Amino acid sequence: MKVTNLLENLKFGDKDPHAEPIHADREGRAILFTLKPGQSIREHNAPSTPFFVVVLKGQGAFAGGDGSEHICGPNTLLMFDSGENHSIRAIEELVFIGILHGSPIAQK
Protein backbone atom coordinates (compact mmCIF):
# COMPACT_ATOMS: atom_id res chain seq x y z
CA MET A 1 0.00 0.00 0.00
CA LYS A 2 1.12 3.52 -0.79
CA VAL A 3 -0.13 6.55 1.13
CA THR A 4 0.10 10.13 -0.14
CA ASN A 5 -1.11 13.36 1.45
CA LEU A 6 -2.47 15.12 -1.62
CA LEU A 7 -2.59 18.61 -0.10
CA GLU A 8 0.97 18.63 1.24
CA ASN A 9 3.79 20.48 -0.59
CA LEU A 10 1.58 21.70 -3.44
CA LYS A 11 3.30 23.25 -6.47
CA PHE A 12 1.61 25.89 -8.62
CA GLY A 13 2.81 27.15 -11.99
CA ASP A 14 3.24 30.92 -12.27
CA LYS A 15 1.81 31.06 -15.80
CA ASP A 16 0.26 27.65 -16.51
CA PRO A 17 -1.52 24.95 -14.49
CA HIS A 18 0.75 22.37 -12.85
CA ALA A 19 0.24 18.61 -13.26
CA GLU A 20 2.10 16.20 -10.98
CA PRO A 21 1.90 12.43 -11.64
CA ILE A 22 1.08 10.68 -8.36
CA HIS A 23 0.95 7.16 -9.80
CA ALA A 24 1.29 5.61 -13.25
CA ASP A 25 1.41 2.03 -14.44
CA ARG A 26 -0.26 -0.10 -17.13
CA GLU A 27 -3.52 -0.21 -15.20
CA GLY A 28 -4.01 3.50 -14.64
CA ARG A 29 -2.80 6.95 -13.73
CA ALA A 30 -3.50 9.43 -10.96
CA ILE A 31 -2.43 13.02 -11.61
CA LEU A 32 -2.57 15.93 -9.14
CA PHE A 33 -3.53 19.21 -10.82
CA THR A 34 -3.05 22.66 -9.28
CA LEU A 35 -4.32 25.91 -10.81
CA LYS A 36 -4.10 29.49 -9.63
CA PRO A 37 -7.24 31.65 -9.93
CA GLY A 38 -7.87 32.47 -13.59
CA GLN A 39 -5.72 29.66 -14.97
CA SER A 40 -7.44 27.17 -17.24
CA ILE A 41 -6.99 23.89 -19.06
CA ARG A 42 -8.32 24.24 -22.59
CA GLU A 43 -10.83 21.82 -24.04
CA HIS A 44 -9.38 18.36 -24.66
CA ASN A 45 -10.33 14.71 -24.11
CA ALA A 46 -8.99 11.34 -23.06
CA PRO A 47 -9.74 9.33 -26.21
CA SER A 48 -9.39 5.82 -24.82
CA THR A 49 -10.38 6.02 -21.15
CA PRO A 50 -12.98 7.60 -18.90
CA PHE A 51 -11.58 10.50 -16.85
CA PHE A 52 -12.55 10.88 -13.21
CA VAL A 53 -11.94 14.10 -11.26
CA VAL A 54 -12.12 14.60 -7.49
CA VAL A 55 -11.94 18.23 -6.37
CA LEU A 56 -9.84 18.54 -3.22
CA LYS A 57 -9.58 22.30 -2.67
CA GLY A 58 -11.01 25.52 -4.10
CA GLN A 59 -13.66 26.25 -6.71
CA GLY A 60 -13.50 25.65 -10.44
CA ALA A 61 -15.72 25.79 -13.50
CA PHE A 62 -15.78 22.40 -15.22
CA ALA A 63 -17.37 21.96 -18.65
CA GLY A 64 -18.16 18.63 -20.25
CA GLY A 65 -19.25 17.46 -23.67
CA ASP A 66 -22.44 19.52 -23.65
CA GLY A 67 -20.43 22.72 -23.08
CA SER A 68 -22.30 23.81 -19.94
CA GLU A 69 -20.16 24.83 -16.97
CA HIS A 70 -20.62 23.47 -13.47
CA ILE A 71 -19.07 25.27 -10.51
CA CYS A 72 -17.55 22.56 -8.33
CA GLY A 73 -15.74 22.57 -5.00
CA PRO A 74 -14.21 20.13 -2.53
CA ASN A 75 -15.58 16.60 -2.33
CA THR A 76 -17.10 16.75 -5.82
CA LEU A 77 -16.66 13.80 -8.20
CA LEU A 78 -16.88 14.47 -11.94
CA MET A 79 -17.00 11.66 -14.49
CA PHE A 80 -16.18 12.21 -18.17
CA ASP A 81 -16.75 9.45 -20.73
CA SER A 82 -13.98 8.24 -23.04
CA GLY A 83 -13.51 10.85 -25.76
CA GLU A 84 -15.73 13.43 -24.01
CA ASN A 85 -14.37 16.94 -24.41
CA HIS A 86 -13.88 18.84 -21.17
CA SER A 87 -12.26 22.04 -19.93
CA ILE A 88 -11.44 23.54 -16.54
CA ARG A 89 -11.14 27.10 -15.24
CA ALA A 90 -10.00 27.96 -11.71
CA ILE A 91 -12.16 30.46 -9.87
CA GLU A 92 -10.14 30.10 -6.67
CA GLU A 93 -6.86 28.30 -6.05
CA LEU A 94 -7.94 24.88 -7.35
CA VAL A 95 -6.56 21.43 -6.52
CA PHE A 96 -7.97 18.22 -7.97
CA ILE A 97 -6.89 14.70 -8.75
CA GLY A 98 -7.55 13.18 -12.17
CA ILE A 99 -7.78 9.40 -12.51
CA LEU A 100 -7.55 7.55 -15.82
CA HIS A 101 -7.77 3.85 -16.57
CA GLY A 102 -4.84 2.39 -18.49
CA SER A 103 -1.69 4.02 -19.78
CA PRO A 104 -1.09 5.59 -23.19
CA ILE A 105 2.16 3.62 -23.40
CA ALA A 106 0.41 0.31 -22.68
CA GLN A 107 -2.32 1.06 -25.26
CA LYS A 108 0.04 1.54 -28.20
Image (cartoon, helix red, strand yellow):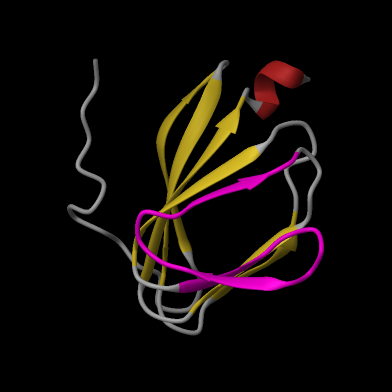
Residue 72 shown in magenta: yes
Quarter of the rendering occupied by the N terminus? top left
Decide if residue 19 is on the left or right side of residue 28.
Answer: left
State which quadrant residue 28 falls in.
top right
33 over 106 or under it: above or below: below
- In front here: 3 or 53? 53
Viewport quadrant of the C terminus: top right
Identify the residue at horizontal 75%, vertical 50% (top origin): 45
Q: Position of residue 16 (x, y in %)?
A: 51, 72
Q: Is residue 73 left or right of residue 103?
A: left
| Point 35% across, 67% down: residue | 12
Residue range (magenta): 60-81
Residue 5, placed above or below residue 18: above
- Counting from the top left corner in percent of width and height, residue 85 is at 78, 56
Point 67% across, 17% down: residue: 106
Residue 21 point in image, percent of width and height: 43, 40
**Number of marks drawn:** 0
